[in-house]
Image (spheres, rainbow, N blue to C red):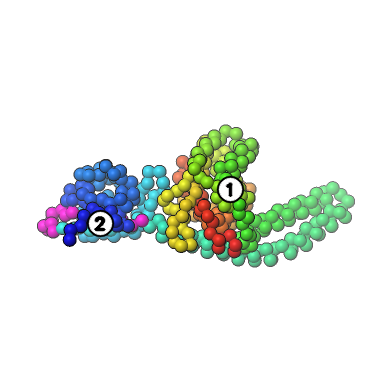
Amino acid sequence: MKHDLQGIFDALLEGVLILDEADRIERVNPEARRLLGLAVDATPGRTLGEVLGADHPVCGVVERVRRSGRASIHDEIEFPQRFESPIPVDVAVSNIGDAPSGTPSALAIAMRDRSAARTLREEISERERQESYGHIAAGIAHEVRNPLGGIRGAAELIGMRSQDERSQKAASLIVQEVDRISGLVDELMVFARGDRLELRPVNIHRLLDGLLDLVQLERGHEAIRLVRRYDPSIPEFEADEARLQQVFLNLVRNAMQAMESRPGTLKISTGMTLEHRLVGEDGRAQPTVRIRIQDEGPGIPEEILGRLSTPFFTTKPKGTGLGLSVARHWVRRHGGRLRIESVLGEGTRIDVDLPLHPPAQEIRT
């Protein structure tokens, strides 16, 4: 029984691309087109380098196979995307056919998208970090809160009994600092308490507009241009409005503060994402809303980027180092994820992905 070879390729979940002896594309399936960003009518008879550009990582793998004559397998090569983040892809390139020794042969390139696996690893790692923060927070609260109460009471007593103004001011300062530390402890306890979310239908655009109008009035943000690009098709979805306000207010303020020394444009966009969607309890991808905050600030050094969600780590002179870690916590409690990408000298982009239907186990723990 004969079968259509292209039909078989098209049915494969992995990307497959066949090159002839001159590296011209002979066959390519839809998954390979997606991973490589190829247009449907742009590939027949053209070489891989012509279509992708010689600097594409898969072209480098093909070149190495041509030189060595041996198959090559590479894990999680970053495939660039035109409008999205790079996709991690496992790539295997091997010779096919019976070309005489020393003669170029046809090549088969197999590609597997590893985005889901990478995301799962990151989510597991983030969950473990959040749990460890919870243990730390509980310990800090136990050891700090009782002494703080005693210090505050003693300072108030000193203030009431003091006759001179200097002593009264000192006592008042102690009370203020104790209250500030207590506030930090309360923020840190977010990781340990597991507060239940108050779910109700939320219009994400109304929420964003409200907080953007608020931060625009803050001092130092007058020269920053706000651009809002909303997808009007996004429906209301269940979420804790107060917690999401906390999340996005923190993220937008961070972006604006990053541009205070070099004012530019802050873009806030929304949309339904079809790629890198969230996965539900049943393992299936589910409808996902993406809120993107993109600034034109100085960017974040790579060595700092991975530490930004660590409680009390901050690059701001007066920052507490809790804002971003708390934001990530509430996004995760909604069953979503928060990702940060930055390029020095160009700016920072934050993507918050939220499911239309938050998982029950995430909101009742």
Q: Residue at x 52, y 38 (%)?
A: 228
Which residue does the numbered mark 1 point to in the structure image?
202
Residue 200 located left or right of residue 17 = right
Residue 157 percent coordinates (x, y)? 84, 57
Tell me if mark 2 has few (under 14), some (14-19) or many (20+) residues whose alpha carbon lies within 10 angstroms of its own. few
What's the mark number on residue 8? 2
Query: Is residue 328 at all visible to an observer of this figure?
Result: no
Sequence-first tag of 1 and 2? 2
Amino acid at the residue labelled 2: Ile
Residue 129 appears in which quarter of the rendering? bottom right
Residue 136, picture quadrant: bottom right
Classify residue 213 by image quadrant: top right
| Boundaries of the magenta span | 98-113
**Quadrant of the image containing the C terminus:** bottom right
- Image position of 135 with respect to 46: above or below: below
Residue sitting at the far left = 100
